Image: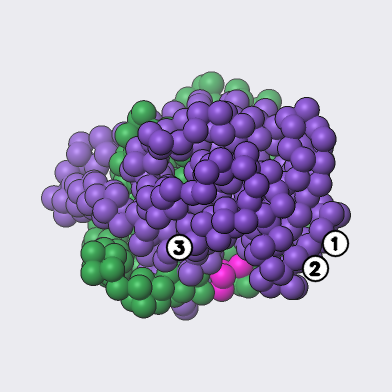
Chain colours: A green, B purple
Amino acid sequence: VSGTGWRALAVVGVGLLGASVALAARRRRVAGRIVGVDRDPEALDSARRLGCLDEAATDLGAAACGDLVVVCVPVDRVAAVVRAVAAGCRAGAVLTDVGSTKAAIVREVGALPGGVAFVGSHPLAGSEKQGPDHADGDLFAGRLVVVTPGPDTDERAARRVDDFWRALGARVERMTPEAHDEAVALTSHLPHVVASALAGSLPPELAGLTATGFRDTTRVAAGGPELWAAILRSNRDAVLAALGRFGDRLERFRRALADDDAAALLALLAEGKTARDDLDLDAGPLDTV
Amino acid sequence: VSGTGWRALAVVGVGLLGASVALAARRRRVAGRIVGVDRDPEALDSARRLGCLDEAATDLGAAACGDLVVVCVPVDRVAAVVRAVAAGCRAGAVLTDVGSTKAAIVREVGALPGGVAFVGSHPLAGSEKQGPDHADGDLFAGRLVVVTPGPDTDERAARRVDDFWRALGARVERMTPEAHDEAVALTSHLPHVVASALAGSLPPELAGLTATGFRDTTRVAAGGPELWAAILRSNRDAVLAALGRFGDRLERFRRALADDDAAALLALLAEGKTARDDLDLDAGPLDTV
């Protein structure tokens, strides 16, 4: 048993994120034992080959042995998996997840059996790639994980979840589920929709005329459509508000160009540059720790 | 004098692109002599320190010694610089440029003194960074350069421009100035506007909640506002058409989400993913040569 005191870590869903959690936990000796659970035997095999699992199971019940359970399934299945696993857990067990939205999950999880706690997490790390073959034991190093306890969440459990992510090398910030969802609608969900719409606007015959600019701007559009449809639907109101905000700004560009208004165009471009340049100033600790 | 037969290469404007042209030409021994011209003495000094210039001058007239002159100034100044330099060139001289739009430039350059030819070029390579300190002698290696002769362009001169870019390691494709501008409106100018509008939509207090997705999607927004205002204005109609095309697709996303239409949302995301994945299939020769 390691210093952070987890006897058994169960990871449910060993895709890119789940396998990265298991790999990071193994390398950093965060848990005495690591159990991987996935309904897909091929994914389990791939994760096992990474050397990060002590036990692999296709039966969800196997996850109940964990005193920490990290649920790494698509957002529209998180709550059901949490409730199913929690029913079999011992008192004192803590469950968390890695879903990109939090309010709907926290609401749907609701009350759990006595002594079992759920604390929502969202690591701001990932990839447009999928599956355990793309797992990365350093995926969380220096990254931000937002932990979202609700008013009824046991504070001791929330602190243990904070400590778990810190043990994987991440920085932790606390937010309410609702504030989290509004923020990531703008920082993550809107960029995904924009990148996808941009990629989808390209006439295929022009693919050869794209350069690194188009490729970078659309990179995230390669993410899994099912995963992203579920994320967007579970954060519908905030994403629609973000689309409205972006649409207003795009319309200002369109009007400046239609009116050949050089000053307005320059001002819009300068504001975009300032906002983008400021991200790199902030990026120091995030990218180098 | 090298195999491609340029006695003297003059580069006007030694920013990121101009200095990269000079650096690539020096390394690949494409010209007997390389002359750099820039009205900014500091940029000239930086370029000179790269070791790629035999001569540096702030006087535009110095460029007329080139039998090849590559004009690397912002698109709204290319035509005037080409006409000014061409007036002093010997018969047989060939001028080209690296501007991101072509139709307006070709139209404004118009007829030149007898024996002096202008052939438009656009290397699909660059960076959001500016200035000779970011020059890269391999910037054109494996990249596409679009060469855009008009109906009155001397074919021998156009072929020599093709050969020049190939000597720097690039692939060359011929297009009309108009077809080029319509294509890059979608592959380059639209992504710039979208990235800038997205960066400008971010509330500054959420900067810390961005991850690599937001950063990649907005990377090009860090480009120079003056450069980009000039590019967008010189390709106004095609950029407005591209914005319309993108806006239609974004509206389909908005409607699918507002209607909670899972099938429509999934279809849009899948189309975006296919388009993006196809770019990487095409990327082999571009990224590896």
State how far apart marks 3 and 1 are (Cα): 28 Å
B99 or B116: nearer the eye? B116
Q: Where on the picture, by quarter, is residue B138?
A: top right
Label 2 element class: helix
Same chain, labels 3 and 1 = yes
Label 1 packing within 10 angstroms: few (<14), some (14-19), many (20+): few
Name the residue located 78 percent from the left edge and 62 percent from the top edge: B56
User: Which chain does tag 3 point to?
Assistant: B
A83 or A274: nearer the eye? A274
**Three-letter code for the amino acid on which mark 2 is drawn:** Asp
Rendered image: mark on residue B45: 2
Residue bearing the label numbered 3: B76
Instruction: Report x, y in % for residue A233.
Output: 27, 50
User: Which chain does tag 2 point to?
Assistant: B
Same chain, labels 2 and 1 = yes
Left or right of A266 in this view: B240: left
A125 or B271: nearer the eye? B271
Query: Is the stretch drawn in magenta largely helix, strand or loop?
Result: helix
Q: Which residues are magenta?
A: A275-280
Left or right of A263 in this view: B21: right
Same chain, labels 3 and 2 = yes
Instruction: Report x, y in % for residue B20.
Output: 70, 50
Asked if disc 2 and disc 1 are in contact, CB closer than 8 Å, the reply is yes
Of the 4 image quadrants, the one containing the C terminus of chain A is: bottom right
- Is B91 within the magenta? no
Residue bearing the label numbered 1: B49
